Image (cartoon, helix red, strand yellow):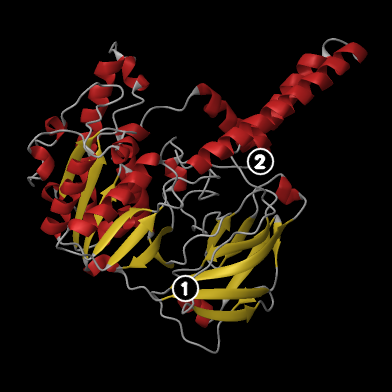
Amino acid sequence: MSVRKQQLLKQHRRNKRLAIFIILLGLLVLGLTMPLWVVPLALLILWAAHEAWFADHLFYSPTDDYQYRFPKNTRRLQLTAVNKRWQVTTEQLSTGATVIAKVSLKSSWLGRWFDPVVRIGDDSQTFERGAQGVRYLNLTGQAEALMTEGLPVQGRFCHLDPVVELYIFEQTSPVNENIMILAPHADDAELAAFGLYSSADNVSIVTLTQGEIEAEYYQRLGLSQQQAALLKGRLRTWDSLAIPLWGGVPQTNCVQLGYYCMQLSEMAKQPSVPFASKESGETDTRRVRQYNSLKLAGDVTGQPTWQNLVADLVGCLQHFKPDVVVMPHPDIDPHADHIATTQALYQALEQSTWQPKRLFLYANHLHDNDRWPMGVANTGVALPPAMVELPADELFSYVLNEQQQLDKAMALLMQHDLQPPLPLKKRIRRHIQALFTGRRWPKTGENEFLRKAVRRHEVFWVRQL
C-alpha cells in the first residue's frame, strides 16, 4: 500500500471514530429523555443507513474536480449539446479513436442518495453520489454515432452543462503487435486486459508473484497457515499459467516468476537480500517455475531477490521481444506489488538489449475510491478519480463486445482468489443497498471484481519509449 493510501485510510478512520463518538453521545441523551426501546431502534436505523449510504470507501470530496491533463498536441473539439444530443458535424473522427468527453456534472438532490448516472448513446456511466464538478466520460466505440445522428445524453439524478470538450486520442490498437503483459499476481492480466489480449495475435503474460498470502479460506480444510499459503500459491500459479488459454494465449507464452506476495517493495530496498514468503515460509522460487518453458536468470539459485527479479524481466523482454508492455500505472494503482512491478520493469529496460515501443499502463486498484469503475457490470468505464495531477499521458480505450465481456467474466470465475463466498457482513450490506439505493450486482458471481472489471471498456494510459 502506498504512503498516500495509508494517509487516506488513517484520515478516514479518524473521521469515522469522531462520528461514532458523536452518535454515541446522541444516543446517550436519547436514552435519558426517551423510552428505553427507542435506543436499540435508533441503533438499527443508524446501522442500516450506514450500510446503505456511508459504507463506500470514498476518501475525497465528491464536489472536487478531477485533475487530468493531457499532452499539448492532443486533439480537442468543443461542442454544445442541442436538444440533449451531442454531435460532431465539422470534423471527422476515426471510428477506432479513443474519445473522452470533459463535462461539468452536478448531482441533483436525489443524486446525493442514489448513484448519478449519465446515459450516453447506447451506454451509461456512473459517478459518486453527490458528484459535482469536472468529470470525464468515455465515448470510445461511439464515434460513428457522434458524427452522424448524434449521441442522446441524459442524466439520471444529475445534470450536465451543455458545453462539452472532447479529447481525441489516435493511439493505434496493439492487437496486431507483440504484447507482453506484466501481472503482479494471477488475475491482474485478466482484470486489466482480458478483452485486449484475447483479441491480439501475439501475447505473452509474465506473472511476478505466487499470490500466496491471505489464505485463511483454505485453513477451513484443516490446514495450518503455512500449509494453506502453500496450497494457495500452487493454485494461483496454476491460474497464471492455465487461465490465459481461455483467451487464446498458449501456456508456452506464460511465465510464472514465483516471487512472494507483498515482498516486492521490500526486495527493491535491498536488491541482493532474499525475501521469503510472509506466510508459507518458502524461500526458493524454483518450485513454481517448473512449468515455465523459458529458462531465466533466477532459475540458477531460486533466491527471491530484487536482482533476480530484474534479471528475469530482462530475460523475458529479450525472449518475447514485445512491441507493447502492459503493466500497472505507478501513480494511480496504489498496491505495493503493482508499484514495484512497474519499477522493476523500468530497471529491466535499462539493462535490456530489446526495447518496446509503447507502455500501456492500467489500474486495478485506486488510492481513494474502492468502487471504481462505479455502476453496474457491462456498462462503460469513465476515467477514474484523479484528485492530484497526473503525468500528461495519452489514453487508449479498448472496446469489448458482449461475447468478450462474457468470456472475461468466465475467466475471472476461474481465478481461485475470486471464488470464496462473500463474508456475511458484505452479503447483508448488498441486500440493504439493493433495497434502499437500487444498486445491482451481476449474476455471474459475487466477487466485486465481476462488477468492476467486466465492462464495455478497458482503459490504458500510454507512454511512448
Tell me, for residue 460, which label it has, or none: none
Quadrant holding the C terminus: bottom left
Q: Is residue 409 visible?
A: no
Q: Is residue 403 above or below residue 232?
A: below
Q: Amino acid at mark 1?
A: Pro
> Percent x, y for residue 264?
30, 38
Q: Is residue 211 above or below residue 142?
A: above
Q: Mark 1, mark 2: which one is toward the viewer? A: 1
Drawn side of residue 101 relative to residue 288, left or right: right
276 or 448, nearer to the observer: 276
Left or right of 115? Residue 349 is left
Task: Please name the amino acid that badge 2 sits on.
Answer: Thr
Residue depicted at x 23% and y 65%: 356
Residue hosting label 1: 71
Q: Residue at x 43, y 42 (%)?
A: 449
Instruction: Report whether 352 appears left or right of 394.
Output: left
- Name the quadrant containing residue 464: bottom left
How many numbered marks does the figure carry? 2
Query: In terms of secondary structure, where does tag 2 sit?
Result: helix
Where residue 347 appears, x then y in whole percent?
A: 26, 53
Q: CA distance from mark 1 to mark 2?
A: 39 Å
Q: Residue at x 83, y 22 (%)?
A: 26
| Residue drawn at point x = 18 percent, y = 57 percent | 351
Question: Judging from the image, what secondary structure is the residue with disc 1 in?
Answer: loop
Residue occupied by mark 2: 437
Q: Earlier in the sequence, mark 1 or mark 2?
A: 1
Q: Do the CB atoms of the residues marked 1 and 2 lie less than 8 Å apart? A: no
Local packing at callout 1 (Cα closer than 10 Å; few below 14, some 14-19, many 20+) is few
